[in-house]
Amino acid sequence: MHRLSRRSVSSVLRHGAVPYRNAASPMSSTSALYDTVGDRDAKHRWYSVLTNGKHAATNSLTQLNLKSNLFLGSRFESTAAASDSSATPPAERYEYQAEVSRLMDLIVNSLYSNKEVFLRELISNASDALDKLRFLSVTEPELLKDAADLDIRIQTDKDNGIVTITDTGIGMTRQELIDCLGTIAQSGTAKFLKALKDSKDAGGDNNLIGQFGVGFYSAFLVADRVVVSTKSPKSDKQFVWEGEANASAYTIREETNHENRIPRGTRLTLYLKRDDKGYAHPERIQKLVKNYSQFVSFPIYTWQEKGYTKEVEVDEDPAEAKKDDQGETAEKKKKTKTVVEKYWDWELSNETQPIWLRSPKDVTTEEYNEFYKKTFNEYLDPLASSHFTTEGEVEFRSILYIPAISPSGKDDLVNPKTKNIRLHVKRVFISDDFDGEMFPRYLSFVKGVVDSNDLPLNVSREILQESRIVRIMRKRLVRKAFDMILGLSLSENREDYEKFWDNFGKYLKLGCIEDRENHKRIAPLLRFFSSQSEEEMISLDEYVDNMKPEQKNIYYIASDSLTSAKNTPFLEKLLEKDLEVLFLVDPIDEVAIQNLKSYKEKNFVDISKEDLDLGDKNEEKEREIKQEFGQTCDWIKKRLGDKVASVQISNRLSSSPCVLVSGKFGWSANMERLMKSQTIGDTSSLEYMRGRRVFEINPEHPIIKSLNAASRSNSDNEDALRAIDLLYDTALVSSGYTVKMANAKLRTLPFYNQPDNPAQLGGKIYEMMGMALSGKWSTPVAFQNPSANPGKPETLEAEVVEPVEAGGQK
């Protein structure tokens, strides 16, 4: 087998047999090695043995060297006698080779998912060239003698599909063309940075962008042919590099045409593919520059068509001219029209400055607002902003904003992918398409810019790879966002936070469900109506400050509206004791509070669930009441059967006869209603999730006293049993449950669907029942309407009316 020496291989690569030095190609088959061995000894069968990363072959199993203990996926076999030789043949070293056209195809078509990033990569290269020149000119000012302006200019020819990008940077010599463009994955910028790092006199920050050495080849995403004309201030000659897509070779020649001469720098000419000639439109190029390279530190000019208006004379119509001649006294005026004169000129495309690089002390509120409007295409000033720099393990700069209004109608909570956070690396835009990497879903409304010099990106710069650095960055961004919102809530202008809450309150409630780690930051920002503040929302801190000294819990009731919540029978006893109750009227409120569980060591308690403790237990009195009404509870439970889990004496009622409470660990009436109303929900499968229901009665109410008498004197009375059914159905309504009336006649009533004010409806039914049942099984009693003022009881007397048949005869 004929083998080339390393020097011969390098010579072949340098002279163009393989266009890129140190390029990799598929390894050749090892069958040739086996054939050579076979020529020496045809009796042997050979297998590859991997030992310390080198290929080795032996003639005998007994002579196999296993000192390294590395025998991976290999097999050795011999049919001949052991060899007398004990020496191991020397291992031969080979360099990887590459099929360059295939490698180029992988780089171009596999690294980048979006074609339009080609302009970002090429502008970044131009910016690096300008930065290198600026840095080197500090010690070598003669490098700037040919051209003083440091800028990037992009010109297009939409008719021929040509894009030209010119910079006045450092340029390249012939050897640098071979090293940088002829060697795949060799980054000239990375080399330069390493040289700076190794240099003792290198100091100060640098803004160089490149690191992977493949950005240039992104030009082949849209171009069939790329021509690079470059002039280095270190050389008197200008060279031209030319390459084609899917080609395995390139050419370099000296520029001899004086018309194509440039004083210094590099000019890239892209001859676009047929399907990608749309990138040659000036408007599209300008849009890409503004999107990806808006904050590059050098001016970027694009060749744009412009126009100005002017007045020109119009030739008169001969017929009109004859008419004008007939009028001797009329004054003749020259007719003119307004036309737009078109011309082409350079236009600055990156005029917005990256204000996050400045000190927050030097930036005014007007500048922050103007930057926000330009960057995110908004027309309203933001509610708040936060400009900060983090140092230490992760270093980045950022400006965060809270928008004035919700852009998606307040309901887009399920979409974690937003374009509100614009990630930059060294001022070059990378992406705004994140799936929760930078911010959690519930903070997706926050807009901002994040700029870092050392983010873990993949080669295409499109994907932010998951790492510890990213997690640390996310934590710091979330913390700063909460600090900004908290500052807004503590602002003297209360209207600002009310406006924020109207637009983004649901997002924070979602955070209670999804982010337990930040409960302590979210809870102080929540706002609710309460029984003592029905017009203005209060915070949990305000609730805790207003708590009674003996109060141990934070009470709440969940309902579908503020009207239903403030009229619910569950409130009666708490209002008498002047205990404040939070009204949860948003569908997400109840789930959010249940996930919080407590605030400042005060547990949240749902007053619509069983075992409510108001701190006023009197065991002796309770024992007496249970003894008196125990038989009545058993009688009612027997009538209601499986509809309720038990019948108990209530400690939460004062004016209503009864109420239906949910089990301690089951769904509340509000949650049951919400789950049944889901459009894709199967109500039959949700039945097993329904909590146990407890029927609580008020022993002080006249209706319950009448039923207590009926249970003792006439427990089988049909009127008494129907009264129990009606009490249960009315309690369903007033307690907020979905109604399914036991009485067929009630199903035909217009209020069969859930009424706007269930408690008010229940009060009217209780009033009619009190009139009907008063004195039926005992002496007449005064009835108090639950919906009336508790301090003014109204005494009603029942009137006996004899039935009248049709026709008016008794």
Image: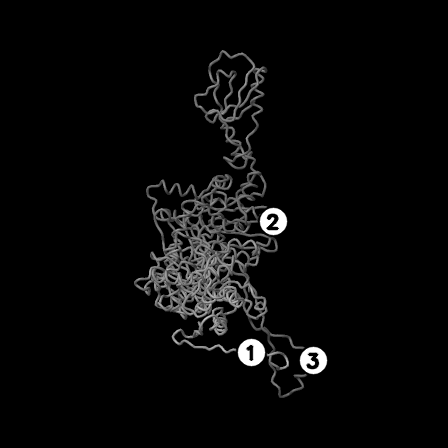
Name the residue beneath numbered marker 3: 319
Q: Residues within 10 Å of mark 1 (few under 14, many from 20)?
A: few
Whether 412 is drawn above or below 782: the answer is above
Q: Is the Cβ of the residue at disc 1 closer than 8 Å to that at disc 3?
A: no
Name the residue beneath numbered marker 1: 802
Residue 28 percent coordinates (x, y): 56, 29
Direction left: furthest residue: 549
Gap between marks 2 and 1 measured at Cα: 98 Å
Q: Earlier in the sequence, mark 1 or mark 3?
A: 3
Residue 522 percent coordinates (x, y): 39, 57
Quadrant in the picture for the N terminus: top right
Direction front: furthest residue: 713
Q: Residues within 10 Å of mark 3 (few under 14, many from 20)?
A: few
Of helix, strand and loop, which one carries label 1?
loop
Quarter where residue 308 is shown = bottom right
Residue 770 percent coordinates (x, y): 47, 72
Q: Nearer the viewer, residue 654 or 624?
A: 624
Q: Nearer the viewer, residue 574 or 441?
A: 574
The amino acid type of the residue labelled 3 equals Ala
Q: Earlier in the sequence, mark 3 or mark 2?
A: 2
Q: Is residue 57 visible?
A: yes
**Nearest-to-viewer mark from 3 and 2:** 2
Name the residue beneath numbered marker 2: 273
Q: Nearer the viewer, residue 65 or 564?
A: 564
Gap between marks 1 and 3 measured at Cα: 105 Å
**Nearest-to-viewer mark from 2 and 1:** 1
Q: Is residue 171 left or right of residue 520?
A: right
Whether 518 is drawn above or below 655: the answer is above
Whether 441 is drawn above or below 758: the answer is above
Residue 295 percent coordinates (x, y): 44, 55
Q: Residues within 10 Å of mark 2 (few under 14, many from 20)?
A: some
